[in-house]
């Protein structure tokens, strides 16, 4: 550095991914001397080679360069996005600044900008030069100063991430296989909530007898006299379902569709390494699987695989936080209930998938976001300047294709006849789509709820006016503002 006439404060020592650090103390000494003169340490290509979290924790580098594998197409792959987000949290913990390597497209730079990465390098910002420019390329400058936000790739949500059979574990008393029916009956009497009792030999389960089974037996005439003091193994299930405590919850859903429904009534035995640990019930399994799948549906709709309510809310809030003009559009079908009642849910699902396909086809994946609220309700958040033409094209395409889902006779008739709530036959025209639109200006809407309410109001007007695309010029006063005013009064 001195030979080149450079100050030591401008020197950054880079530890490459191929360097294996064996003597932490020695390298720390070198780094501390460098830091005393204003120098700094950088890790290169973190995520490749010998780079490690332990080394990051011990050396506290000022800069960490993210390997280009995680940067390339980060706008398309949720696992790369989540990796960069995790590294950002680690950098904050360790007091380091991240540098994204290998940025080659506007989409990559845009998403890294939105994630808050302080530094980036790559051909899109500028080619290597002996006399480097002090500013990035004009294209990169436009991305960095644009208020348009990126559309994040949908993060795959595992409906039961991290959940195993341990979550279903119920501690329960045990008996030996030779225990009498009378003893088992006494244990059930003392443990009102116990649904079954495991039979154990040498810590290994050898049977299971349910409360219901024992109750039915004791209702039989002379059973107590004949079997009361005999071993309970005579009437226990000798082959209960054994579930290892580490089994992922998703694997247990097969129990729900099993031909042997005893598992739903008497439950199952939870083991670890073949040894008894506790019991599980079919009711708890049904509840937990249902809750997990409902939560997953809030992230991605299971019919269309489009983002659900949570990603929709997060994207609206990102747009609001960035003070970005955008279009909020609420899409809903007309006469869909009559169609669904007449043809059944299978064809009803086909109609909703067609709706999703037509709406998604007009969205620019770089600028426009589409989410599926549920049923035939969709939300579009558009940053494309030609949004009106896009939406009109979606309406025209859907209305033209939706007719093909009707039977030929109903196509000729122009709709279907179905009974109303009073049992009277009513004619319903072929299904069409209505789009309610609101222009969202910076500062007018405080939160995602108020934007969604305004878009829903526009959708209501669109259906009332039988308009394909209806722009609500004067959006209603914000609920969020009204609530704030009420709190202040």
Image (cartoon, rainbow, N blue to C red):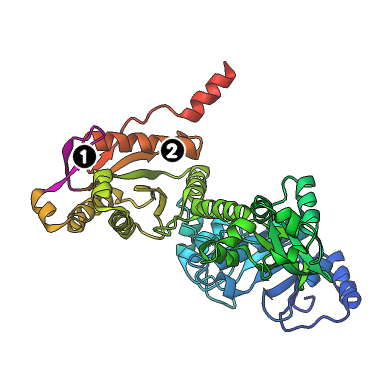
- Whether residue 132 appears in this view of the structure is no
Q: Residues within 10 Å of mark 2 (few under 14, many from 20)?
A: many
Circle number at residue 419: 1
Range covered by the magenta-colored residues: 414-430
- In this rendering, position of residue 345 left or right of residue 369: left
Secondary structure, mark 1, is: strand
Q: CA distance from mark 1 to mark 2?
A: 36 Å
Asked whether 131 or 451 is in front, the reply is: 451
Q: Earlier in the sequence, mark 1 or mark 2?
A: 1
Residue projecting furthest to the top: 489
Dividing the image into 4 quarters, which one contains the N terminus? bottom right
Q: Is the C-beta separation of discs 1 and 2 under 8 Å?
A: no
Residue 252 lies, in percent from the top left, at 60, 65
Residue 129 lies, in percent from the top left, at 57, 77
Q: Is residue 425 magenta?
A: yes
- Whether residue 23 appears in this view of the structure is yes
- In this rendering, position of residue 354 left or right of residue 466: right
Q: Could you tell me which residue is drawn at 48 percent across and 67 percent down?
A: 76
Between label 1 and label 2, give the one nearer the viewer.
1
Circle number at residue 153: none
Secondary structure, mark 2, is: helix
Dividing the image into 4 quarters, which one contains the C terminus? top right
Residue 119 lies, in percent from the top left, at 62, 63
Asked whether 126 or 314 is in front, the reply is: 314
Q: Is residue 464 magenta?
A: no
Q: Could you tell me which residue is drawn at 24 percent across and 33 percent down?
A: 464
Asked whether 359 or 55 is in front, the reply is: 359
Count of numbered circles on the image: 2
Circle number at residue 451: 2
**Residue 81 in which image quadrant:** bottom right
Residue 192, compared with residue 67, is above or below; it is above
């Amino acid at each position: 550095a001195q030979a080149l006439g450079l100050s030591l404060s401008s020197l950054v020592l880079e530890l490459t991914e191929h360097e294996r650090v064996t003597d932490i103390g020695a390298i720390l000494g070198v780094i501390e001397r460098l830091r005393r003169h204003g120098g700094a340490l950088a890790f290169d290509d973190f995520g490749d080679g010998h780079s490690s979290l332990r080394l990051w924790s011990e050396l506290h580098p000022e800069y960490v360069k993210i390997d280009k594998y995680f940067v390339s197409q980060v706008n398309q792959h949720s696992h790369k996005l989540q990796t960069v987000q995790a590294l950002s949290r680690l950098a904050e913990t360790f007091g380091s600044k991240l540098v994204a390597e290998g940025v080659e497209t506007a989409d990559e730079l845009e998403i890294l900008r939105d994630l808050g990465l302080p530094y980036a390098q790559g051909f899109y910002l500028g080619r290597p030069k002996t006399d480097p420019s002090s500013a990035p390329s004009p294209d990169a400058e436009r991305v960095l100063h644009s208020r348009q936000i990126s559309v994040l790739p949908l993060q795959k949500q595992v409906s039961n991430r991290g959940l195993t059979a341990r979550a279903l574990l119920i501690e329960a008393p045990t008996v030996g296989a030779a225990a009498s029916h009378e003893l088992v009956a006494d244990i059930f009497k003392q443990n009102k909530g116990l649904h079954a009792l495991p039979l154990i030999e040498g810590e290994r389960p050898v049977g299971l007898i349910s409360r219901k089974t024992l109750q039915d037996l004791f209702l039989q005439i002379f059973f107590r006299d004949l079997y009361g003091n005999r071993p309970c193994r005579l009437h226990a299930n000798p082959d209960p379902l054994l579930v290892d405590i580490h089994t992922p919850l998703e694997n247990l859903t097969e129990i729900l569709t099993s031909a042997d429904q005893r598992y739903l009534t008497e439950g199952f035995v939870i083991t670890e390494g073949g040894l008894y640990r506790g019991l599980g019930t079919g009711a708890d399994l049904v509840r937990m699987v249902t809750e997990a799948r409902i939560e997953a549906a809030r992230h991605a709709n299971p019919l269309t695989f489009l983002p659900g309510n949570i990603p929709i809310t997060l994207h609206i809030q990102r747009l609001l936080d960035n003070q970005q003009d955008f279009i909020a559009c609420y899409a809903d079908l007309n006469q869909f209930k009559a169609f669904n009642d007449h043809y059944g849910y299978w064809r009803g699902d086909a109609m909703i998938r067609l709706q999703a396909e037509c709406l998604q086809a007009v969205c620019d994946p770089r600028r426009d976001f589409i989410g599926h609220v549920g049923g035939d309700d969709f939300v579009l958040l558009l940053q494309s300047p030609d949004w009106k033409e896009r939406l009109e094209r979606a309406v025209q395409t859907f209305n033209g294709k939706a007719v093909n889902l009707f039977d030929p006779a109903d196509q000729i008739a122009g709709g279907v006849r179905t009974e109303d709530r009073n049992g009277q036959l009513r004619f319903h025209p072929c299904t069409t789509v209505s789009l309610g639109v609101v222009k969202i200006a910076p500062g007018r809407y405080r939160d995602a709820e108020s934007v969604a309410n305004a878009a829903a109001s526009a959708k209501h007007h669109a259906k009332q006016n039988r308009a394909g695309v209806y722009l609500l010029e004067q959006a209603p006063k914000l609920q969020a503002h009204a609530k704030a005013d009420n709190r202040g009064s």
